[in-house]
Amino acid sequence: MRRGFAFDASLCVGCRACSAACLLENGLQAGTRTILTWNDRALPLMRVISLSLACSHCEEPACAEGCPAKAYTVEGSGVVIHHADRCMGCGYCTWRCPYDAPKINEAKGYIEKCHLCYERTEEGIDPACVTACPTGALRFTEQEKFEPVGIGWFPETGIGPSLILKEADSLKGPVIIPSGEADNTEEELPQVGLPERIRKEWSLILFSLLLISASAMMIITGFTDTLIPALIPLLLLTAAMAVSVAHLGVPGKAWRAVINITSSPLSQEIVLTGLLTLIALLNWISPGLIPPGVGAISALLALISVDRVFFAADRSLTLKLHSGQAFFAGIYAVSWFLEPGTLFLVFSMLAAISVVMRYRTAEGPPFVRNLYYFRALVLPVVFMLLYPESPVADGAAVVLFLAGVVADRLLFYCDFNPVNIRNTIKEHFANERER
């Protein structure tokens, strides 16, 4: 029998007693159990629906499968438990979970999430959130099989959440006017400066740019007669590995990143990056010891592994055709130095098509919009600068080309949009309101 929750939205009054009980019982941070509201501004002609949601203890938990540190275990009853003592705070599970269950504790550096009060339920006692619910909207349940929720704004990604939702798309229920605590007025204001994702993920962006640069150099060395000093890619890769540790909430447990290589794309990325760094080191210590082709192939695999980390969380076609991918960016950079320039022309055309397909990016915040237009303008300008065939124009073309690749990589992070129930609720409400 699988354990999970049953929630009746027609009985929920949004009192947040369940969230408070979770915090008091388990000592977790506020918001571990989240109260999501459909029509949180109580706009007329639209129903206000509250949803109390924590971990759904999925049949195939994406958090556990993708965790590089194996900080998650799944009990026989299907309860997904997170072990803080194993967590390195990479936050990858927050990308992969479509139900916004794992949350990083900024003060402690590691992930916290609902464990269904496992010790209580083992003794036959309901979870704290269930016992605290004054209306009976939230209940503990055990079933052999949980059917798909089947509600438009609830993301169904095939991982089998152990959750039953009732009346969550119905007009029945008490008329509740939200208190305003969930009213995120700031979201309606225009964003100024760097987007939040770029500010938070700067270390990952820098890591990927360093890895792309080093990989491009090793590919050029492996497949052409151009000789690049082995020390340069070694320094770039060493810096990339060091920068990646800065992203972790618990840097002291960075060694756990390679534990789950069989199923975690992030573990595979770290292993391949480490292998590439080792090859660069051996090439520097003893030139010719490792055949250049081996280094080039390893670099290609490392670039692919970087993209797989993101594709596992965001499977949209837009991201898969994005010219800011690590693999595309690396090969595009290599094509610049190859003769004849047919490959460069082909990749430039592909980049242009990708930019046109992402025209909605221009509707984003000012920084993203300006970055998008810069990327779009750089593509034809580079070709125009190549036409005069002068050293000054060629130098400017190189600078603009590399700046365009960096801009595209930043746009890749801005366009990265993992499935998340917060977003699906907002999108569904916007569509229903317009209709």
Image (cartoon, rainbow, N blue to C red):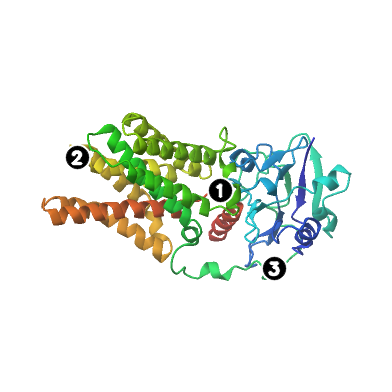
Q: Quadrant of residue 381?
A: bottom left
- Mark 2 crowd level (few <14, some 14–19, many ≥20, 10 Å Cα): few
Q: Which residue is mark 1?
A: 419
Label drawn at residue 178: 3
Which quarter of the rendering shows the N terminus?
top right
Helix, strand or loop for disc 3: loop
Look at mark 2 in the image and give the residue it sits on. 341
Give the crowd class for mark 3: few <14, some 14-19, many >=20 residues within 10 Å: some
Name the element at disc 2: loop
Q: Nearer the viewer, mark 2 or mark 1?
A: 2
Q: Visible in this render: residue 329? A: no
Q: Quadrant of the C terminus?
A: bottom right
Q: Is residue 253 left or right of residue 84?
A: left
Taking the image as shown, residue 82 lies to the left or right of residue 357, namely right
Q: Is residue 143 above or below residue 87?
A: above
Mark 3 vs mark 2, CA separation in Å:
61 Å
Q: Position of residue 253 (x, y in %)?
A: 60, 47
Helix, strand or loop status at disc 1: loop
Which of marks 3 and 1 precedes in the sequence?
3
The picture quadrant where one finds residue 80 is top right
- Residue 401 in view here: yes
Q: Residue furthest right?
A: 124
Q: Residue at x 23, y 52 (%)?
A: 398
Residue shown at 81% from the left, 43% from the top? 141
Few, some or many residues within 10 Å of mark 1 (<14, 14–19, 20+): many
- The amino acid type found where label 1 is placed reads Val
Image coordinates of residue 378 in percent, x first then y, are 26, 55
At a point 17% along the width and 37% down the height, the residue shown is: 340
